[in-house]
Amino acid sequence: MAKRQVDLLQGTLDLLVLKSLALRPLHGLGVSNRIAQITKGTFQVKPGSLFPALHRMEEAGWLDSSWGESENNRRAKYYRLTAAGRRQFDAETQDWQRISLAITSALKAT
Amino acid sequence: MPLIPRLTRLWRNLFHKDRVDRECSEEIQAYLEMVTEAKLRQGLSPQEARRNALLELGGVEQVEERVREIRMGRFIETAWRDIRLGVRTLVHSPIFTIVTVLSLALGIGANTAIFGVVNGLLLRPLPYPEAEQIVHVWHTPPQQSFPGLDRFSVSPANYLDWKAQSTVFEQIAVYTDTSLSLSTSNDPLPLIGGVVSSDFFSVLRSSAMQGRTFTPDDEQPGHDQVVVISHKLWQRAFGANPNIIGQALTLNSRSFTVVGIMPPGFEFPREAELWVPLAWDDKERQTRSIHDYLVLARLKKNVSVKQAQAEMSTISSRLEQQYPQENSGWGAVVIPLRDDLVGDIRLALLVLFCAVAFVLLIACTNVANLMLARGANRQKEMAVRIALGAGRARLIRQLLTESVLLAVTGGLLGLLLAIWGSRMLVRLGSLPNSGDIGIDIWALGFTLLVSFGAGIIIGIVPALQFTRTSISETLKQGSGRTGGSPIKQHTRKALVISEVALSLVLLIGAGLMIRSFWKLQNVDPGFDTRNALTMSVVLNWIRYSEPHQQLAFLDRATEQIRAVPGVVSVGVTTTVPLTGGGSTQPFSIEGRPVGTIAEQPMAQTRYITPDYFRAIGIPLRQGRFFSDQDRDNSVPVIIISEAMARRFWPGENPIGKRLTPSFHKEQGTREIVGVVGDVKARGLDSDSSTMMYLPFKQSPRPFMSFVVRTSSNPESLIQPVTKAIYSIDKEQALTNVETMDQVLTKSLSGRRFNMTLLLTFAGVALLLAAVGVYGVMNYTVTLRRRELGIRMALGAAKMDVLRLVLSQGLTLTLIGVGAGLISAYALTRLMASLLYGVTATDYLTFGSVSAVLILVGLAASYVPARRATKVNPTIALRAE
């Protein structure tokens, strides 16, 4: 199962990261925990995938980052959605819903 | 993301890399610590918590590397880093680098030089606007009279009909070239001039730089004393005088007014330095059976060569029906100007281009092999880097950067070689349009492209090899073993085999050319080239328009030359053998049916003085030479060549038979008084021509070539002999002043050019292949030291070891030779038309070249084999 998880992540990681940041800014571990939480533990994002994704999305202009204090008074880098990131999130959400609807109905077809 | 933030980001990534990296590692560190804290809270011990957190992270280095990989500007940064790393690696092994760069420089330089020629001659458009629309229109002669000739010059009347009837051409012009003498204060200057109709310049879309070109008025006889000069002549003969337009100059003792100067580089027909109008009188305009002119035309837009050809064929067959007497069998062919100018050179150049590409391939193979040989160290380096988190693609990229770096350095050095080489090429092979040959921006681009290609070729095999090995295997191995896995040995052997095969193909190509050249050099030209001198003169229209004037010049010149000390005999002909020119005419034999002119057999015709055969050394076979008694008022006589005698009077005695050359019908039939040996008129590789010799004095011509036999070195007589002729008329320039040996050499220059180049390339290829075999065998011996040591410890004699290694080298060579023979068999037939006297699959060449290559392969394996016999069993075994 572990292998399949990784495969799934390739396409959906961006969307999940955007979703997890939609509510409020988070640091890396926060994003990873939030994803685990909102997917009820289906996705455990490993740092080896998470950090490249965060940096890539930051360079694409969807995320913004700043250093701040963590809940345990530790310096951590916080990510937040930019306006472009929010637009991207909306677009990807719509895409995803269309696709998942289509695939679900395709699988139900007899 | 808008552009500015993007650029800021790129800037930061490239130039504040340290800070970016530090922040990244700080971020990951924080992550790690937060996870550890979480584990602590779950009740793990501090050590366990940290260990679990690290395991979950999967290595700080690896994560950082993966983040780095997605960064903007990553590509540039990596390339730059790889280049620096590459330079450092290469500087650390200077011998390897020098050998590699030099062999690549040779290979790439040779390619660039040949590309310069190919580009200048075959690829680059001619220097006229929309040059692809310009064509030559030739006659195709009747095949029964001119077997093998596919194009023939055009007669005035036919040209005028073509011009009147054709619709496919925007303009159509007619021209010819001629030798002219320009009078100067010193000796007259011999020049090539174009005699052109007024449309000539507009077909080429070229106009004068100063003044004007010709108008239809200039074509009227009597109004044609105007001349357009080339930029080159303007500079060299008139000191670039800005007021030259309107001034008079004396050409062939006749005064011409300069009306225009052409821009620099305009040189058409070849080597022409001035142009005069072509003015036909009424009689000439009706001449249909004397073919003297070339037809140049510009196709209308959207008219293809094929369409033009179709129309010209229709017109010609109409003219055949209209004038069956003169025109039956004469067709027309439309040839794009470039194809026509480049002609026979195309094939030779393509063969050379293939050859030189082979050399580069071999050089690349060798370098790839060298890189593989360095493999052991590199492989460990790679294994360490893979262990440290580098991806395979990343490493392959680094290795390719290194090899491209080598190749581009080699290429730049090669460019210098090519600049020198293309000058050599122009000098060595009298090539047309030599001004267009050289290293330009295209050649530069070509060099870079080839260098990159070569870099990839030499890098890809080693790169794939080095990065394939399993990390633990390589790291575990001690430093004692030179880790050559069996797979890698296979690759190296395959490379050497292909090297041997490629060089065999080249060697066979060169071998065939050499055999052709030897055969040609042993061909008897039919006369004696030693101690003979020749020079030509084209008499001008003013002082020498009358036959008696032409004869007077001939007599006086002969007399003057004969008086020069050291001259043995002097003869005159209209065209010297081996030069390829000369006229051909139909004839009829008395007592045999006389058909139309078009149906009559043809023979080459020369007009000679009685001493000509003695002076040039053509032997008499039967009958007699001409004598001074064969004059205009005596019985018309003729001498024929053996080939002509054999063809038309087989088994008969031709002496006393009679025939009529059609251009001299008014003089009646001529009696054959002698048969002389055959000569090679068009070149050593042509068939012996059927040849008719007529006494010059019975039909004088306004042009003549002197042949002077000397008692000693002919070159020392050039000066006094030319002086003797100028003493008669100092407005009459001499052309083609050469010894007959030079004429012979010149007739072979194209072949010598091809042969020399191909031989050079093949030699380089052979050398490279030998180095390749040596390298692989040497390496094999190193790898097998232990095995050889055991063999010797178990009692193998030195001879056995020698045989073992040699047979391995021999096997490699033999497989290569086998593959090479098959490829050569397929490829050499493409060059069949460049050969003479040998077939493209000549067994002797194939056999002897293979033998040479096998010997070289053996010699190259002998040194490593000797080394193998010197292996000391105890040391070899202990070394493990």
Image: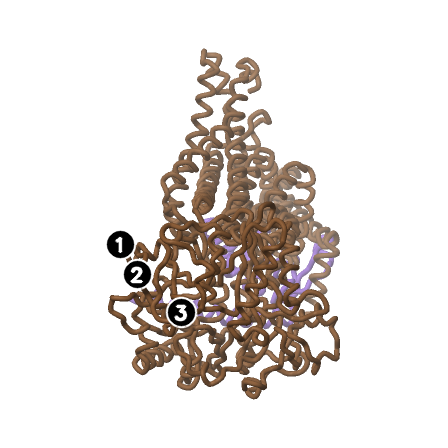
Chain colours: A purple, B brown
Quarter-of-image position of residue B687: bottom left
The N terminus of chain B is located in which quarter? bottom right
What count of labels does the image hold?
3
> CB atoms at circles 1 and 2 under 8 Å apart?
yes
Nearer the observer: mark 3 or 2; the answer is 2
Query: Going 75% across and 75% down the picture, which residue do you hit?
Result: B241
Q: Is residue B108 above or below residue B539?
A: above
Q: Which residue is mark 1?
A: B652
Nearer the observer: mark 1 or 2; the answer is 2
Query: What's the residue type where badge 2 is placed?
Result: Lys
Q: Is residue B190 above or below residue B455?
A: below
Point out residue B780 in the picture as x, y percentages from the top left corner.
Answer: 50, 28
- Of marks 1 and 2, which one's residue comes earlier in the chain? 1
User: Position of B251 compared to B221: left or right?
Assistant: right
User: Position of B142 compared to B280: left or right?
Assistant: left
Q: CA distance from mark 1 to mark 2?
A: 10 Å
Which chain is disc 2 placed on? B
For label 2, the crowd category at 10 Å Cα-Cα, with few meaning under 14, some 14 to 19 and many 20 or more, is some
Query: What's the residue type where badge 3 is placed?
Result: Ala
Q: CA distance from mark 1 to mark 3?
A: 100 Å
Query: What's the residue type where badge 1 is placed?
Result: Glu
- Could you tell me which secondary element the residue under label 1 belongs to? loop
The disc label shown at residue B657, or none: 2
Quarter-of-image position of residue B99: top right
Point out residue B771 in the picture as x, y percentages from the top left corner.
Answer: 54, 35
